[in-house]
C-alpha cells in the first residue's frame, strides 16, 4: 500500500484539556506533548492517532468530519462520556436515530452508535 492513515487532526483552543478528555473517552494515552500540539493513541505503534492543535479561531459550524464510537452498551457509554464533560448535541438527527450525537468540551460533534456485531452491522 502506498499510503495509510496516520492521524486525525483536531483544531482546538486548549489542546491539553481536549486531548485529556479524549484519552479518557477512548482509554488511550498521550504519546507526544508540546504546548500547542498533543498526540494521543492506543499505544506508540498503533495507528491512527489523534493530534490536537491549538488554533486561535473558534469552531463556528457543524463538523463535516466526525468520530463514531461503537460501544458495548450505548446508554452506559453516553452517560459515562457526558460525566467526562461532553454534552448532547442536535445536528438534525431526529428522534428515531439509532445513534446519539454528543459534543466534546469544545463543541466538536461525535456519535455514539448502538452496539455493533461486525463492521457491516
Image: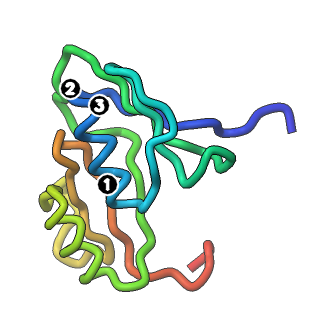
Secondary structure of the residue carrying tag 2 is loop
- The mark found on residue 110 in the picture is 1
In front here: 93 or 110?
Answer: 110
Q: Quick one: which residue is furthest to the right in this view?
A: 1
Residue 106 location, quadrant: top left
Question: What is the spatial separation of the Cα atoms under label 1 and label 2, in whole angstroms?
Answer: 18 Å
Picture coordinates of residue 57, whole percent (x, y): 19, 17
Picture coordinates of residue 17, whole percent (x, y): 23, 39
Assess whether mark 1 and mark 3 are in contact (beta carbons under 8 angstroms).
no
Picture coordinates of residue 107, whole percent (x, y): 18, 43
For the N terminus, which image quadrant? top right
Front label number (3 vs 1): 3
Secondary structure of the residue carrying tag 1 is strand
Residue annotated with mark 3 = 15
Residue 64 location, quadrant: top left
In the figure, is residue 119 to the left or right of 53?
Answer: right
Residue annotated with mark 2 = 13
Picture coordinates of residue 54, whole percent (x, y): 29, 21
- For mark 1, does the 10 Å Cα neighbourhood hold few (<14), some (14 to 19), or many (20 or more) residues? many
- For mark 2, does the 10 Å Cα neighbourhood hold few (<14), some (14 to 19), or many (20 or more) residues? some
Q: Measuring 55% from the left and 54% from the top, which residue is drawn there?
A: 42
- The mark found on residue 50 in the picture is none
**Which of the two labelled residues, at mark 3 and mark 1, occupies the earlier sequence position?**
3
Q: Measuring 61% from the left and 72% from the top, which residue is drawn there?
A: 119
Q: Is residue 35 above or below residue 98?
A: above
Question: What is the spatial separation of the Cα atoms under label 2 and label 3, in whole angstroms?
Answer: 6 Å
Secondary structure of the residue carrying tag 3 is helix
In the figure, is residue 120 to the left or right of 53?
Answer: right
Question: What is the spatial separation of the Cα atoms under label 3 and label 1, in whole angstroms?
Answer: 17 Å
Residue 101 location, quadrant: bottom left
- For mark 3, does the 10 Å Cα neighbourhood hold few (<14), some (14 to 19), or many (20 or more) residues? many
Amino acid at each position: 500500500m502506498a499510503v495509510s492513515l496516520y492521524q486525525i487532526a483536531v483544531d482546538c483552543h486548549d489542546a491539553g484539556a481536549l486531548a485529556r478528555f479524549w484519552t479518557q473517552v477512548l482509554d488511550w494515552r498521550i504519546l507526544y506533548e508540546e504546548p500547542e500540539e498533543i498526540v494521543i493513541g492506543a499505544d506508540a505503534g498503533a495507528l491512527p492517532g489523534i493530534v490536537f492543535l491549538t488554533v486561535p479561531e473558534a469552531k463556528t459550524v457543524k463538523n463535516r468530519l466526525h468520530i463514531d464510537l461503537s460501544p458495548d452498551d450505548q446508554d452506559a457509554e453516553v452517560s459515562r462520556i457526558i460525566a467526562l464533560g461532553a454534552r448532547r448535541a442536535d445536528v438534525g438527527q431526529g428522534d428515531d436515530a439509532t445513534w446519539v450525537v454528543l459534543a466534546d468540551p469544545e463543541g466538536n460533534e461525535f456519535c455514539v452508535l448502538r452496539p455493533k456485531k461486525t463492521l457491516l452491522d
